[in-house]
Amino acid sequence: MFDNLDFDVIRRSLPYLFLDGMSFTLMLTGLSALGGLVFGTMIALMRLSSYRLMGRIAGLYVDFMRSLPLVLVIFWFYFLVPYIGQWLTGASRPIRVGAFTSSLVTFIMFEAAYFSEIMRAGIQSISKGQPAAASALGLTYSQSMRYIVLPQAFRNMLPVLLTQTIVLFQDTSLVYVLSIPDFLGAASKVAQRDGRLVEMYLFAALVYFVISCVASYGVRRLQARIAIVR
Amino acid sequence: MNYNWNWHIFFEQNPTGAGTYLDMLVAGLLLTIKTALLAWVIALIFGTIVGILRSLPSKTASWIGFGYVEFFRNMPLLVQLFLWFFVLPELLPRAAGLWMKQLPNAPFWTAAIGVGLFMSARVAVQLAAGIASLPRGQKQAATALGLTTGQGYRYVLLPIAFRIILPPLTSEFLNTIKNTSVAITIGLIELTGQARAMQEFSFQVFEAFTAATVMYLAINIIVVTGMRFLERSLAIPGYIAGK
């Protein structure tokens, strides 16, 4: 079964796989999670605001993003980002955008929709007495959000946010459709160059599996530790 | 924005010689639906079995269920499809591998099975949670009535557990439909694939993707509406969502 396989190809390509591929994947995951969290929180606040229209717009955005497959969104932004850049900078032609920037914009916009739902649940899980007490103390709306509601919401939602980040880590592999050398893209490049599909894809699967397993084990531990005793 | 919009493109002949660009997209839409339905059947069957395993008192059974779910949840779907499509035929005995590679519509079967198994892990988690959320009295009453474990699941636990998890199952079904687009990487020309092909042939990027977007939105609305009717007709009066 394994007799004509050459697992040495993995050892030979390790530096490329991890220094180029995995660092791209991890950078993309980390920055998208941060950006998604910031925008997601803003969208969640919009949805919960007392301005109906704002809530409606945010809700539409979330529903829209969540009904599209990520692959299609990746294609959309890949072609759209140069035009957005042109519009923002006032250039005369669509600007050239690197693979990393393009996929970063995609994942931030896409994940913001998912993170916003998590944050909305988190904010709603805070009892009404908290913001009420904050405003009784004379805190403004933004102060109450900043110092009272959001810190507790983050804490309650941290395990879910991290689980979503693990999903995001796996989803970044989809930039493969743009032939971007993330971890899977790098593995696939080596696989096709050396004709070693079996070895490389098995190895890639193993790496994703181990990282995701360790991370989700960590999340479970964290969940047990930070749960607020009520 | 200096982009040449041309919405008439949908009614122009596509270069494959078989109908218009719109026909291409509709063919993609149908393939998306076909793949998703088959994948969903697989996900429900395997998800139910594994979900039940996870809820059984036996340690071994719940370990098998746990292992299954972890296996399918901790790898990107794309990697799983590659494993089924590129790796499995090579590791099988020569004749079986050759048969798999020469299968007509190999991307379709691989996509349906790959996406189906991937989603089955999620269905299993939902179902196990649904069963766990039932009051203990349900199972005890079933035993007291003389039902075997199998009968207890068949007639008492599963009918209620499935009703409870119907809303999350709706979103898992929507995820199944969306996830079929990942199969573009193994050469399945479903809706996203057809939009991409249309973009390459005609250079009308945004029209092609707009059309695909509208179709995905339409599928979503139809499924959500349909499931809402199903939820209402299945609701037990006086229970959960029943009125």
Image (cartoon, coloured by chain):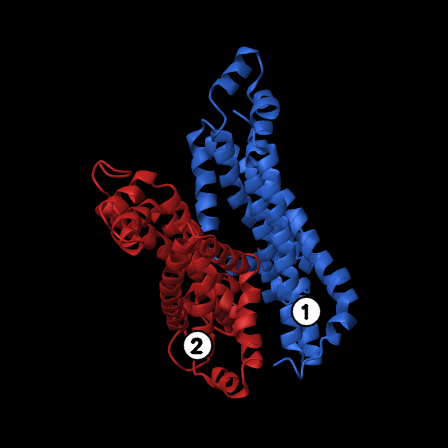
Chain colours: A blue, B red
Chain that bears disc 2? B
**Picture disc at residue B138:** none
Indicate which label's residue lies in the foreground, 2 or 1.
Answer: 1
Pointer 2: residues within 10 angstroms few (<14), some, or many (20+)?
some
Give residue A200's position: percent from left, percent from top: 67, 72
Give residue A176's position: percent from left, percent from top: 61, 65
Q: Is residue A112 visible?
A: yes
SS at badge 2:
loop
Q: CA distance from mark 2 to mark 1?
A: 35 Å
Chain that bears disc 1? A
Left or right of A156 on screen, residue A184: right
Give residue A195's position: percent from left, percent from top: 67, 81
Left or right of A146 on screen, residue B56: left
Question: Do discs 2 and 1 belong to a common subunit?
Answer: no
Q: What amino acid is found at the position of numbered circle 1 in the picture? A: Ala
- Outermost residue, bottom side: B95
- Outermost residue, top side: A137
For disc 2, the marked residue is B14
The image quadrant of residue B178 is bottom left
The image shows residue B176, relative to residue B31, as above or below, that is above
What is the quadrant of the N terminus of chain A in the image? bottom right
The image shows residue B22, relative to residue B166, as above or below, that is below
The image shows residue A225, relative to residue A206, as above or below, that is above
Pointer 1: residues within 10 angstroms few (<14), some, or many (20+)?
many
For disc 1, the marked residue is A187
How many numbered badges does the structure rendering display?
A: 2
